[in-house]
Image: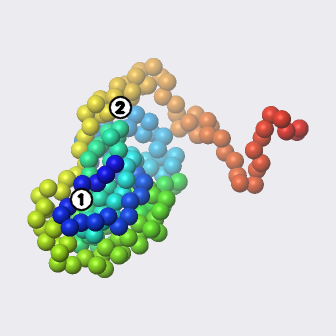
Amino acid sequence: MTLDLLPGESVLLTSKANAIVVPSDYGLTQFAAGHLLGLVGMANREAIGGQLHITTARVAFQAHAFNRLRGVLSIPIPAITSAGKYRSGLAFGVQIETAAARLQFVNWSGDKVLAAIGSAQRSYGSSERSVLNSVAGALQDLAIRPGAESANILATLGLGATGAMPTWIEALSSIEWRTAAEAPIRPSDPA
């Protein structure tokens, strides 16, 4: 997945990430298994998989093709008022704030992402400003992928109609809980 760069823009860092969105903000229905996301600190939200690119001009999240939302979400470097780590339940990553929004990205490389954003902010100058000014109208947001949204609606209807939708207790009980101190159980171990 290659990001289309603006003239004079260069990539400082690319990292796998999930953009955390509220489905209704984009006109989407609730995710078919959305009632289970509260178990990991993501109630009423959805993770959109993709890549987070930190460039000399923007932070750009590029969604994978199989998500219900697709496209590129761009945050111009000068619009960033703060950037830091966040944690919500089991989800953790980077939070970027602008005057208009707070965006969260689940990411395992938070320190590297924050360092790259800091570097972009420190080196942002007139050449980067002119690049962004020339293409400001072309920067996009994420857009609905109709086929994936239709599949989610059908899955929700099918699971609800058949009664096959697990409750949060049933889903939680299906998770195998272990601590790092417990050794894995193998059939050949004499117990």
Return the x and y of residue 36 as percentages of the image width and height. 48, 40
Q: Amino acid at mark 2?
A: Asn
Disc 2 secondary structure class:
helix
Looking at the picture, the colour scheme in use is: rainbow
Q: On the image, which quarter does residue 162 sit in?
A: top left
Q: Residues within 10 Å of mark 2 (few under 14, many from 20)?
A: some
Q: Which residue is mark 2?
A: 152
Q: On the image, which quarter does residue 186 sit in?
A: top right
Return the x and y of residue 86 as percentages of the image width and height. 45, 64
Q: Amino acid at mark 1?
A: Leu
Disc 1 secondary structure class:
loop
Q: Residues within 10 Å of mark 1 (few under 14, many from 20)?
A: few
Q: Which residue is mark 1?
A: 5
The reply to whether residue 110 is in sight is yes
Residue most extreme to the right: 190
Circles 2 and 1: CB distance less than 8 Å? no
| Label total for image | 2
Eyeballing the image, is 54 above or below 179? below
Of the residues under marks 2 and 1, which one precedes in the sequence?
Answer: 1
Q: On the image, which quarter does residue 7 sit in?
A: bottom left
Q: Residue at x 37, y 49 (%)?
A: 50
Q: Residue at x 38, y 59 (%)?
A: 14
Q: Nearer the viewer, mark 2 or mark 1?
A: 1
Circle number at residue 182: none
Q: Marks 2 and 1, how far apart in space? A: 32 Å
- Quarter of the image for the C terminus: give it: top right
The reply to whether residue 86 is in sight is no
